[in-house]
Image: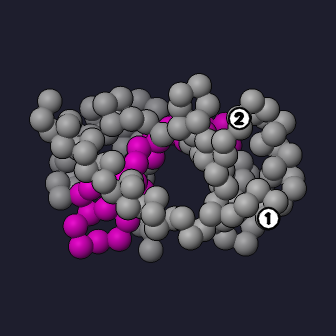
Amino acid sequence: MKKIFILLLCSVAVLSCATQKKLSNLVNERDVPERYVKDMTRQRPNVEKKSWQKIDSTTYAVTFTDNDNLTRVTYGNNYTQTAWIVPAEYVPSSITDYIKGNYPSAIVNEVSIVDARNRKTYQATIQPKGSNVKVLEFDINGNFLSEVVNK
């Protein structure tokens, strides 16, 4: 129980720091390409509070709460990716055990269920001590698939 509480506390602290860093990328909805705004409105007409972020020149993400779930949809030229943020207490133990075993000093920034190209996976964003941010991908059963280093 103590470990879960500490993990949750660290996650909240890191997520709030990461959110502060990302605030510089926030954009007004009127600055988002019209096709992304229309798609968002068509797919989720009841969502009122949305926060848009510019990832790069052609990629935008919108974050919102839908049915009490924190959700992020990323729009790119050729894809749409939906991520549901998983609260720390609901992260499968196989994922937390893998992270603890392979990255004992890492801070878990976020774990989400990602639906990209009709394939659902878990993605854990971690910050190992003295290293770049890494995204660990797990199948829907919590089995490790791959690692990507973000610079």
Callout 2 touching callout 1 (CB < 8 Å): no
Secondary structure type for disc 1 = helix
Residue 79, image x, y percentages: 73, 52
Picture residue at 46% right of the left edge, 67% below the top: 21
Q: What amino acid type is highlighted by mark number 2?
A: Val
- The amino acid on which the numbered mark 1 sits, given as a three-letter code, is Asp
How many residues crowd around disc 2 within 10 Å: few (fewer than 14), some, or many (20 or more)?
few
Q: What is the number of the mark on residue 31?
A: 1
Q: Is tag 2's residue or tag 1's residue first in the polypeptide sequence?
A: 1
Query: Which quadrant of the figure contains the N terminus?
Result: top left
Secondary structure that dominates the magenta span: strand
Quarter holding residue 150: bottom left
Of 144 and 8, which appears nearest the observer? 8
Magenta residues span 106-135
Residue that badge 2 annotates: 47
Give the quarter of the image for residue 88. Answer: top left
Residue 111: x percent and y percent? 41, 44
Find numbered disc 2 in the image and state the secondary structure of the residue it sits on: loop
Please give left or right for residue 109 compared with residue 102 in the image.
Answer: right
Does 92 lie within the magenta span? no
Question: Pointer 1: residues within 10 angstroms few (<14), some, or many (20+)?
Answer: few
Q: Quadrant of the C terminus?
A: bottom left
| Residue 147 shown left or right of residue 130 in the figure | right
